[in-house]
């Protein structure tokens, strides 16, 4: 299954190239807008997702679509792993992450590199845990991305995916759709100077196979014990699975 039908821009570039360009464009306002547009709830979501790993106490974690590193920093705070490796397709986002790693003196624990969920440059069975926050809906080929993450996960290892989903109950659904369609793109344009980035956001969420469809896809690829947990009236969800 691919997510290819929805892309940030028009043109012939692949979804992957377009997503990289988009995140390069918005990298310097990304953190601020994230917290601002979600009213800070994204921070609570991240903490809840990370706590899913407390029971396995992972020593080595891979953070895919690491962006500016927020999910990984939260992991370090809550789980105290020996090593976190972050990969992302946007050099602009990684630049911001590197700066934050330096400011927090976490270079001994956390390193980032350019990388792609669909072709990870790691050996099989390398990581105790894998985390992805708000990244899987940007994968060009969702199945391939999930399969490659499974490959580098150790046997019994666990994956935690945090992703936007679609609320289904009245009036949350209507309010959410209005906010996502009009408010988010307005502030996105205002602060990020990339007109398409925050219009692509609701489009990519609408096209993403959330809920049971996503856990079924995880199972199809080979994940076991998959679970789906809805957060904040269904605005986002935590998905977990083991190898």
Image (cartoon, grey):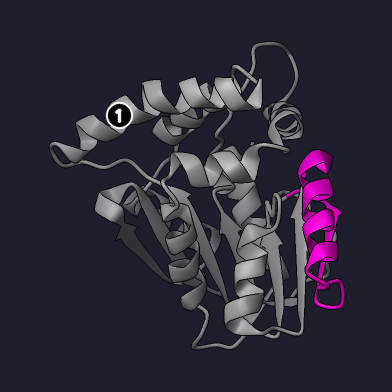
- In this view, the residue in front, 146 or 54, is 54
Is residue 180 toward the left or the right of residue 111 in the image? left
Estimate the x, y position of residue 120 in percent, counting from the top left: 79, 56
Which stretch did the figure color magenta?
A: 89-116
Residue at the image position 57 percent from the left and 20 percent from the top: 189
Is residue 62 toward the left or the right of residue 112 in the image? left
- Residue 6 in sight here: no
Estimate the x, y position of residue 30 in percent, counting from the top left: 64, 40
The reply to whether the magenta stretch includes residue 78 is no
Estimate the x, y position of residue 46 in percent, counting from the top left: 50, 62
View extreme (left): residue: 170
Residue at the image position 14 percent from the left and 36 percent from the top: 171
Vertical arrangement, residue 55 with respect to residue 43, above or below? below
- In this view, the residue in front, 224 or 12, is 12
- In this view, the residue in front, 60 or 199, is 199
- Label tally: 1
Residue matched to label 1: 177
Crowd around label 1: few <14 · some 14–19 · many ≥20 (10 Å): some
The reply to whether the magenta stretch includes residue 91 is yes
Residue at the image position 22 percent from the left and 36 percent from the top: 173
Vertical arrangement, residue 198 with respect to residue 224, above or below? above
Residue at the image position 72 percent from the left and 48 percent from the top: 118
- In this view, the residue in front, 19 or 159, is 19
């Amino acid at each position: 299954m691919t997510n290819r039908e929805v892309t940030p821009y028009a043109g012939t570039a692949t979804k992957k190239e377009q997503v990289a360009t988009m995140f390069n464009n918005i990298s310097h306002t990304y953190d601020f807008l994230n917290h601002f547009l979600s009213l800070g709830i994204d921070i609570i979501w991240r903490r809840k997702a990370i706590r899913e790993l407390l029971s396995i106490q992972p020593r080595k974690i891979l953070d895919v679509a690491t962006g500016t590193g927020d999910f990984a920093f939260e992991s370090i705070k809550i789980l105290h792993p020996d090593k976190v490796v972050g990969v992302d397709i946007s050099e602009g986002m990684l630049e911001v992450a590197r700066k934050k790693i330096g400011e927090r003196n976490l270079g001994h624990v956390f390193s980032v590199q350019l990388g792609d969920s669909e072709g990870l440059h790691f050996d099989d069975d390398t990581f105790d845990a894998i985390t992805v926050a708000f990244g899987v809906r940007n994968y060009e080929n969702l199945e391939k991305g999930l399969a490659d993450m499974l490959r580098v996960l150790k046997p019994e290892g666990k994956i935690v995916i945090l992703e936007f989903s679609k609320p289904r109950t009245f009036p949350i659904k209507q309010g959410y759709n209005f906010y996502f369609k009009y408010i988010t793109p307005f502030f996105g344009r205002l602060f990020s100077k990339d007109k398409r980035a925050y219009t692509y956001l609701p489009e990519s969420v609408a096209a993403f196979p959330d809920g049971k469809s996503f856990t079924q896809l995880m199972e199809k690829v080979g994940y076991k014990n998959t679970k789906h947990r809805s957060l904040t009236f269904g605005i986002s969800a935590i998905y977990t699975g083991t190898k």
